[in-house]
Every structure is written in structure tokens, then in C-alpha cells.
Amino acid sequence: MNRRIRTLVAGAVPIVALGALLASPAAIVPFAAEGPGPVFDVLGEVEGAPAIEISGTAEDDPSAGRLDMTTVAVSHNLPLSRAIGMWADPDQQIVPIEVVFPPGLSTEEVERRNEVMFADSEANATAAALRALGRPVQVAVARVLDDGPAAGVLEEGDVVLAVDGVGVTGPRELQDAVGAHAPGEEVTLRVARDGAERELAVRLGEHPEDPARGHLGVGIAARPGEGVRVDYNVSGIGGPSAGLIMTLALVDKLSPGDLTGGRHIAGTGTIDGIGTVGEIGGITHKIAAAREAGAELFLVPEANCAEALTADAGRMPLVRVRDLDGALAALADPAAAPRCGA
């Protein structure tokens, strides 16, 4: 074999190898892709059911507008060829797989953690909305993780009245009281069950978001203390970042008038039980999704404003909010609402 042929063969080997690697379905890269996800009108229906369903009252005031919950679409288990294609797509962002699945956690563990986070977010949304409307709040156990610290002690439907003798008036009070203890410490809960009160001791586990904080391993629900029931049909879709929009939808449903003013509103942001709006991830993707859906205004958590300004919002105003009161004021008078960057 002469020198020219040997050179051609040597040069072809890496090209053929690269082609085989790109074509191989087994060549999975340790990255995920994030991009604009679907939007859901939480004043309407999700998969054939009301996104927020209210029973036990005649109140459920209809709205002529929309309140869109925005999401981020995540793709993982990507072959190298698809990852390269998504990397070239300006609407997609390639991130390390650890951003989506934290190290040391299985897919099942992440799903269980997310289920608890969804329930906590819904509880905070209910509590914030009820407080804004001046209604009493009860804190109940919505779910007990089978392998959680409270398994076999707490039951679904238990209403938590106090932690270590200190009264609980909302989800945040329960979360703060439990989180003030370290994992392994014991707390005493006073709960109402089947019309009777009882004292129950739980040895806390480790909080999935903060290893220094104690955790019950339960999902909690805030509910009105007047026989009214609120059910959310967005678990597994919304998560914590839908908290603000769910809260606004509940305020709209339980109060007279149309909170949206007939407009198409979108937004994002976590919320706690007293109405503080928190930072979220994927803001640029959510803005893109809202813009494509035709939203007239987008509510941005104050802490996300700097990043939000890097997104292509088109003609859609980016309204800065730090709490529920600010969001309600923005919807009442959009022209006077503070903007990101202003």
C-alpha cells in the first residue's frame, strides 16, 4: 500500500468512527435540553378537567380572560446526534444532566420529591389566596410518603393544629416550625383526626432541598375553614413555579369580578403562604412560550428580571412582581405596573 492510500485510510478512520458514533442510539450524552414548554390556562381546563376546581360553595366566578401557567420542556437521554441538533436550535439550551436530576438521586426519588413539592406549592397558593381574601385557613396532610419519616404516624386528612405546642395557621408556619429542627430530632404534632385531637411524635428526616433542615415526608394542603374544597388538577405539570399563577386564579374564582379584565395574562413564580413571590428557573423559555401563545402581559418574579430582559418578549410587557399584592395591583392597572429594567 503506497503512502497516499495509507494517508487516505488513516484520515477516513476517524470520520467513519465519528459517523458511527453519531448514528449509534447507544451514544447517550450526559446533558439535557431545555426549551419553551406548553402553556395552560389555569382558569380553564387541563386534560378535560378544571385546572382549579372549587366545591362546597356557589362561588366560582367565571372569567373572560386567561391566566397562563408557563412551563419548560426538558429532554434527556439524548443521543449525541440529537444533542448536537438541539444545541444548534436557538430555542433550546443544553445543560448538564445534573441540573435536571441532582447527583445521588434516582429518577423515582426525584419524582417523589417533586410530588411533595407540587403539594406544598398548591398549599401555599391556597393559603396566600385565602389570606388575601381574609378567609381562615386549615393545614391538612394531603399525602404521606410510604418511606417518609411520618409514615405510619400521620394519615391523609389529618389537620395539623400545632408543632411542639405552637399553633399552626398556615403551610408556612408548619414548614418553618419543622425546618427549624435538624434531621433526626423529634417533633410533637397536635392533629385533628376523625373529630378528635391527638398528640403524635415524628422523628424527622432530611429535607430534600436542604440537608440541614428536618422534613416530615408529607405533602400538605391548605384548605378553607368554611367547608369549601379546592382541588388542583395540575400536579405533575405545574410544580412550584406555577404558585403565583395558581394563586391569582383562585383569587379570581373566589372573588366577584374578572381579575384579568378580559386580558390574556401569563407569568411564573413560586409563592409562599404569605404571598411572597420567589425566583424560578427557565424564565427565558417561559417568556418565549407565552409570547408564542399570544399573551398580552407577563408577570416576572423580581429576582428573575435581569435574566428576563435577555429574552425576546416581542411587544409583551414584562411586569416585575415581588408579592401577591403587587401582582394584584398590576392586573388592576397594567399601565402603571412596574416593568423589568425600569
Image (spheres, rainbow, N blue to C red):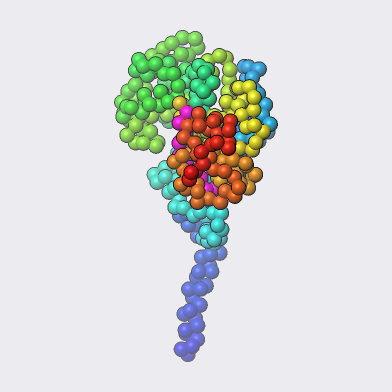
Instruction: Check residue 277 for magenta coloring.
Output: yes
Q: Quadrant of residue 245?
A: top right
Image point (50%, 21%), residue name: 131
* Residue most extreme to the front: 336
Instruction: Tell me: 115 left or right of 295.
Output: left
Whole-percent x, y for residue 258 in the image: 64, 28
Residue 227, visible in the rendered structure: yes
Instruction: Check residue 342 for magenta coloring.
Output: no
Residue 52, visible in the rendered structure: no
Q: How many marks?
A: 0
Q: Which residues are magenta?
A: 275-285
Image point (46%, 47%), residue name: 306
Image point (54%, 30%), residue name: 329
* Residue most extreme to the top: 196
Q: Nearer the viewer, residue 30 or 239?
A: 239
Looking at the image, residue 15 lies above or below residue 27: below
Whole-percent x, y for residue 51 in the image: 62, 31
Q: Nearer the viewer, residue 267 or 226?
A: 267
Image point (42%, 45%), residue name: 102
Whole-percent x, y for residue 82 in the image: 55, 59
Looking at the image, residue 21 lies above or below residue 107: below
* Residue most extreme to the bottom: 2
Looking at the image, residue 247 lies above or below residue 58: below
Whole-percent x, y for residue 45 in the image: 66, 33
